[in-house]
């Protein structure tokens, strides 16, 4: 291979790396669809493999929670540094391909100097300086990403933590739908249950978008220890099913919330490749105990217990396998969640 051919191949390879970088950052940042981008997917896969090694064996739930608190931040840094690597290698190849730098090592050093905006090794010729100018702008773009894009996701994570904490405060640990309904009637706020479902309907749609487009968020733990967003969603789904099928009077928002939650969870499950799993067996005794607890709190439980049982069981079957399937990739054990009316 002649020297000229090698320079041409290096130039084409460098341009390809730059195109891949721009395609990746447009999809991940501007279109907000990182899981549809090859660079973000490989970064997520590398992160997932690293954490799987750390959590190999049978770690306790507490250790799993401590480790997975780092999952999403690490995944983001891996993605950012993958972008930096593409830019440095791409512009390094371009530098050498157009003979802006005399050798490949010097070309890579010049590229790293430009993308970091330090400028300590800018080539002395006009071609190298133009390339450094362009690459420096890309380095600034990455900084802007860190300063503007990441805080939005951190805010989404904080809103999730606040929503989940409110459910745990009212429905215990693990939270259950029956306990949540009972709390609202016991505190004289039965009318607020519909308002809660309405508020959660909007939030669950937001969660479906943020956690499917950035799947690492689904696995990353909340700021509060031992409080899991999926367990809270289970409690909310059961509370909506109870309000629809077991409590006297109609809940205008229960069906709407259940439908929105099911669609959101399907998107999240698709993003993290979770498959439906058989839920614990339905238990009439557990269902009757939940009904008695709600009745003792002042909830108007329907008199026809058999009809209520069959209706509730049919509604719960629509989402139970999906939520149980999500517990495996999210790594929450059976003691951290509970479906109403099941063993």
Image: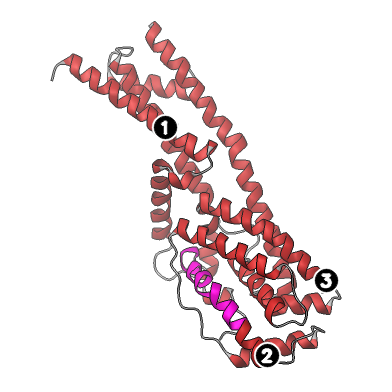
Q: Was residue 315 drawn as part of the magenta stretch in this picture?
A: yes
- Whether residue 226 is visible to the viewer of this picture, yes or no, is no
Seen at 62% across and 89% down, the residue is 286
Identity of the residue furthest to the left in this view:
1
Q: Was residue 107 drawn as part of the magenta stretch in this picture?
A: no
- Whether residue 30 is visible to the viewer of this picture, yes or no, is yes
Q: Which residue is mark 3?
A: 191
Q: Quadrant of the N terminus?
A: top left
Work out whether mark 3 precedes mark 2 in sequence or the reverse, and give the earlier one: 3
Q: Are marks 3 and 2 in contact (CB under 8 Å)?
A: no
Question: Real-space Cα distance between discs 1 and 3?
Answer: 52 Å
Residue 171 locus on image (x, y percent) = 71, 74
Q: Is residue 276 above or below residue 134?
A: below
Q: Is residue 186 above or below residue 200?
A: below
**Which element is circle 3 on?**
loop
Q: Which residue is mark 1?
A: 21
Seen at 52% across and 31% down, the residue is 142
Work out whether mark 1 precedes mark 3 in sequence or the reverse, and give the earlier one: 1
Q: Is residue 73 above or below residue 27?
A: below
Mark 1 or 3, which is nearer the eye?
3
Extent of the magenta region: 312-330
Pick whichever, 253 or 268, lies toward us: 253
Question: Real-space Cα distance between discs 3 and 2?
Answer: 23 Å
Work out whether mark 1 precedes mark 2 in sequence or the reverse, and give the earlier one: 1
Pick whichever, 238 or 255, lies toward us: 255
Q: Which residue is mark 2?
A: 289
Question: Real-space Cα distance between discs 1 and 2?
Answer: 57 Å
- For residue 179, what is the image quadrant? bottom right
280 displayed left or right of 204:
left
């Amino acid at each position: 291979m002649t020297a000229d051919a090698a320079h041409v191949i290096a130039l084409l390879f460098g341009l390809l790396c730059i195109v891949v970088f721009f395609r990746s950052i447009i999809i991940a940042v501007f279109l907000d669809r990182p899981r549809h981008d090859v660079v973000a997917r490989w970064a997520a896969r590398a992160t997932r493999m690293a954490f799987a090694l750390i959590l190999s064996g049978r770690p306790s739930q507490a250790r799993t929670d401590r480790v997975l608190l780092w999952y999403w931040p690490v995944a983001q840094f891996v993605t950012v540094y993958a972008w930096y690597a593409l830019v440095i290698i791409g512009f390094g190849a371009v530098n050498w391909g157009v003979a802006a730098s005399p050798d490949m090592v010097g070309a890579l050093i010049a590229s790293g100097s430009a993308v970091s905006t330090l400028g300590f090794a800018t080539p002395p010729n006009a071609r190298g300086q133009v390339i450094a100018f362009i690459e420096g702008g890309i380095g600034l773009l990455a900084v802007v990403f860190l300063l503007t894009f990441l805080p939005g996701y951190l805010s989404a994570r904080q809103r999730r933590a606040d929503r989940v904490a409110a459910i745990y405060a009212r429905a215990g640990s693990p939270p259950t739908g029956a306990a949540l309904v009972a709390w609202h009637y016991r505190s004289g706020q039965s009318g607020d249950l519909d308002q809660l479902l309405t508020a959660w309907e909007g939030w669950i749609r937001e969660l479906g978008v943020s956690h499917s487009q950035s799947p690492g968020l689904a696995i990353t733990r909340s700021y509060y220890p031992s409080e899991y967003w999926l367990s809270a969603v289970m409690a909310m789904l059961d509370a909506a099913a109870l309000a629809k099928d077991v409590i006297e009077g109609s809940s205008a928002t229960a069906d709407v919330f259940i439908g929105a939650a099911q669609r959101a969870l399907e998107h999240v499950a698709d993003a993290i490749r979770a498959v439906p799993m058989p839920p614990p067996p339905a238990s009439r005794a557990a269902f009757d105990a939940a009904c008695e607890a709600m009745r003792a709190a002042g909830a108007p439980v329907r008199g026809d217990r058999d009809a209520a049982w069959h209706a509730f069981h049919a509604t719960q079957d629509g989402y139970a396998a999906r939520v149980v399937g999500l517990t495996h990739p999210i790594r929450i054990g059976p003691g951290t969640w509970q479906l109403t009316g099941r063993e």
